[in-house]
Image: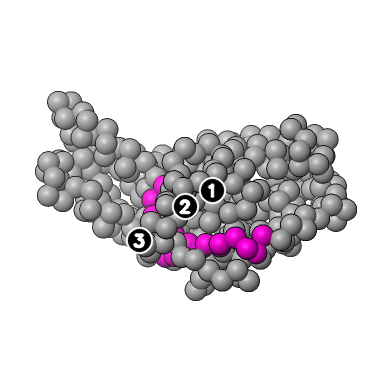
Amino acid sequence: MGIKDRRTKILLALQILPSVQADDKKFPSLIFDEKIQKLLNLSMNQKTKSMLAGMVKEGVIEKTSQQSAVGNNQSVETHHDASAQSGVGSQQLSQLNQSNADSTDSTDSTDLTSYRLTNVGFSQLCFQFPFFRFLKEEWDGKWRIISYEIPESKREIRDHLRREMQGWGLGPWHRSFWLTPHPVFERLKELVVGKEEEKYIQAFSADHSFGQRAILIEKVWMIKELDKKYREMFKKWHDILASDVETNLDSPKNSKIEKFLQVISEYVTLLREDPGLPKQLIGEQWIGFEAYNIFKEIKSILLS
C-alpha cells in the first residue's frame, strides 16, 4: 500500500476500502478481514488491536454493528463512462466483473469487529490526504496564506514543520509564502503556539479579489503536471487489468488481490501529491475526481 505508519493505514483504509459510500451523516463501516489485512500488510496482532482500541477511545474511529459492515465483498454500481474516457479498459473491467459472478467470495466475516471513521478521524486523514476533504465538506471560499522564515541554524525545527505541513494542500506562491484553500490554522496553532517556531510564522486568511485564478492555480500547484501523472497512472492501471485474470487468491502473480495491491499502490502515491482543491477552483471535470471514481469501480470488482 506504500504506507508504513499503522495509524495512517487504518484511517485511509476506512476511507477508501468500504464497499458502500458514506452518506451525509455517517461514514461506511469496514471489517478488517484477512483480505483487508493483506491489502494493508497489517496483521491483527496485539499492536494493531491496541491501536484500534486507542483510536476508538480518542474518538477518531468507532465500532459499528456487524450488520452495517457486511459488505466488504459486495459489488457496487460501476462507472464505465469514466473508465472509457480515462483509457482504463472497460473490456478488462467487464471481464473481471464476469469472473466475479463465477467465483463470488462467500466467506462470512460477520464475527469480526467492524469500524468506521468519525468526523475527527476524517479531519485527521485530510491533513495527510487533503484530496478527500472537499468531497465531503464545502469550501468556505477563503484562501489561507502561511509565511515562515526559519534560519538555517534552526534546520531541525524547519524540517519538522515542513513534514507536518506536507499534507495540507499547500503550494509555493512566492518565496516563503504558501497558499492553500484548506482550513489549516487550528492545526497550525496546535503545532507552534507556545513553541520556539511560533515567532518565525505568520498566517493570513483572504479572499481572491482580482486576477486570473487559473494562472495562479497553475503557478502554485502545477496542475498540468499533476494531470499528466494521473494519465500515466491510468495507463499503468490498464496494463495491470489487462494481464491474465486469475480467480485463485493463492496465485501469487495474477490474483485479483495482487492486482488490486498494484492498483492501490500507484494510487496512494499520487493521492499524496494531489492538493485536494475544491471544485470551485479546479472544476468538476478535474481528472482527480475521475480517478477516484475509477478506483472505486476497480475496487468493487477486484475485492468482490
The answer to whether residue 141 of the structure is visible from this angle is no
Mark 3 is surrounded, within 10 Å at the Cα level, by few (under 14), some (14 to 19) or many (20 or more) other residues, namely few
Is residue 273 placed above or below 63 in the rendered structure?
A: above
The answer to whether residue 187 of the structure is visible from this angle is yes
> Which-is-in-front pick, marks 3 and 2?
2
Residue sitting at 65 percent across and 64 percent down? 110
Residue sitting at 13 percent across and 45 percent down? 195
Q: Whole-percent x and y of residue 119?
A: 42, 65
Kindly report the distance in space between the C-alpha atoms of the residues bearing marks 3 and 1. 20 Å
Q: Whole-percent x and y of residue 203?
A: 22, 50
Q: Amino acid at mark 3?
A: Glu
Q: Amino acid at mark 1?
A: Met
169 or 166: which is nearer to us? 166
Is residue 151 placed above or below 102 in the rendered structure?
A: above
Q: Secondary structure at mark 3?
A: helix
* Residue under pointer 2: 49
Q: Secondary structure at mark 2?
A: helix
* Residue under pointer 1: 44
Q: Quadrant of the N terminus?
A: top right
Q: Earlier in the sequence, mark 3 or mark 2?
A: 2
Please, which residue is most extreme toward the top here?
153
Q: Earlier in the sequence, mark 1 or mark 2?
A: 1
Q: Amino acid at mark 2?
A: Lys
* Residue under pointer 3: 58
- Judged left or right of residue 271, residue 266 is right
Mark 2 is surrounded, within 10 Å at the Cα level, by few (under 14), some (14 to 19) or many (20 or more) other residues, namely few
